[in-house]
Amino acid sequence: MRTPDNSGARVSGAQTQPPTTLRTLLTDKLGWLGLRSAQVLLALALVAVVIFVLVQVKLVVIPLLIAIILASALSPVVGWLRRRGLSPILATWVTLLSAIVVFGGIVTLIVFAVENQWSELATSASDGIDQLSTYLTEGPLAIDAAQLEDFRNQGIDFLTSSQFGSGALAGVSVATEIITGAVLVVVILFFFLKDGDVIWNFFLRPFKGERLRRGRRIGTTSVRVLGGYVRGTAIIAFVDGAAIGIGLAILGVPLALPLAVIVFLTAFIPLIGATVAGILAALVALVANGWVVALIVVGIVVVVNQLEGNFLQPVVMAQSLKLHPLVILVALTAGTILAGIIGAVLAVPIAAVGWAIVKTWNAPPELAGQARLA
């Protein structure tokens, strides 16, 4: 009896398998994963190059971003004046000069009110740190003094390092850059308030159909989010500064006014700003009034922050800023690394606008509208 010969079947089966080519290598699972990885790496490289270029010209980029944010916040005023019959240029001048007068007046009042107390504030904060260090090393916690001193020195080294100084301190200390940036902000803000809609429509000229509607949605969303963020943050900062300042005054803590000013200013940096201001206020209270009052100050700061986060912020900010705290923290870190304190202030509204644009990228056509910066 002859056994069946399966060699022909094996040969036939082998011949039916497609030959391995470059196309099959790129389209199988491993090849698809490799292509996607290469695309992601390329996108990250392009983003890194763009960020590097923007950082090199930050003297122009930062005033531009500030002007865009301020124009978004002031756009309702310009629109209201136009509806009252004022010409675009007259409405722009009235809004711009009024904003300069109000802002300059607030800054002048703050400077005259606290200019003679800053040195005392710094001394009190330093004394408070010394008392806290003594308690940590000699109190029940018994922390090693060498470790505490090393931690303190690391903080001082960071604050005096070239990286931090170039981003936060050097820009403040160079008067020329400040003046140049301020002039650029005012000039760019004027044109955004006067011709913001015209400028945006100019960039949208190459687009038609859905792409044009998408561009208009992006413009409208950006103005709404940025304007709401600035107005809402200013209101929250004022409430926080007033509430904590009144609490410090009632407790008899010295330097209540400059501490309230610091609370107001740091409120523009979400999450960490209120924490830093609260620590500073507690240190001053520790030196001047003792541990009990310092703990009460900490309690006041915590209560105010909780009321702000749970009641005031949802009402004032509304839809302007809906970001997870982790996203805010990452944005703050990235902004601080790239541009110091200014970067920390601008990072969160930029992140909020980016997320709002993502959500409205494929919005229904009925949401499309004329993008206006004024």
Image: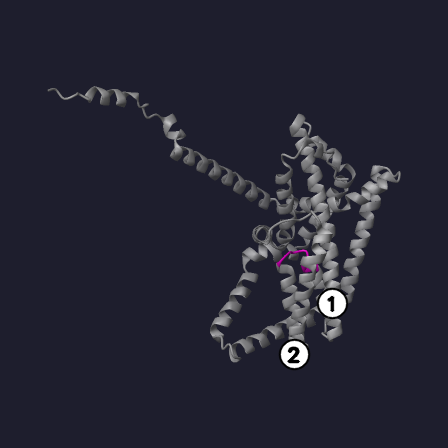
Q: Position of residue 191 (x, y in %)?
A: 76, 39
Q: Is 87 contained in the magenta span?
A: no
Q: Position of residue 20 (x, y in %)?
A: 32, 26
Q: Amino acid at mark 2?
A: Gly
Q: How many marks?
A: 2
Q: Amino acid at mark 1?
A: Gly
Q: Is residue 119 left or right of residue 132?
A: right
Q: Quadrant of the C terminus?
A: top right
Whether residue 282 is visible: yes
Whether residue 123 is visible: no
Q: Is residue 106 left or right of residue 289?
A: right
Q: Position of residue 108 (x, y in %)?
A: 78, 60
Earlier sequence position, callout 1 versus callout 2: 1
- What residue lies at 50% left-to-right and 40% top-to-bottom? 45
Q: Quadrant of the N terminus?
A: top left
Place residue 79 in its image quadrant: top right
Residue under numbered circle 2: 290
Which stretch appears magenta?
265-271
**Res. 245 mark:** 1
Q: Is residue 98 above or below residue 281?
A: above
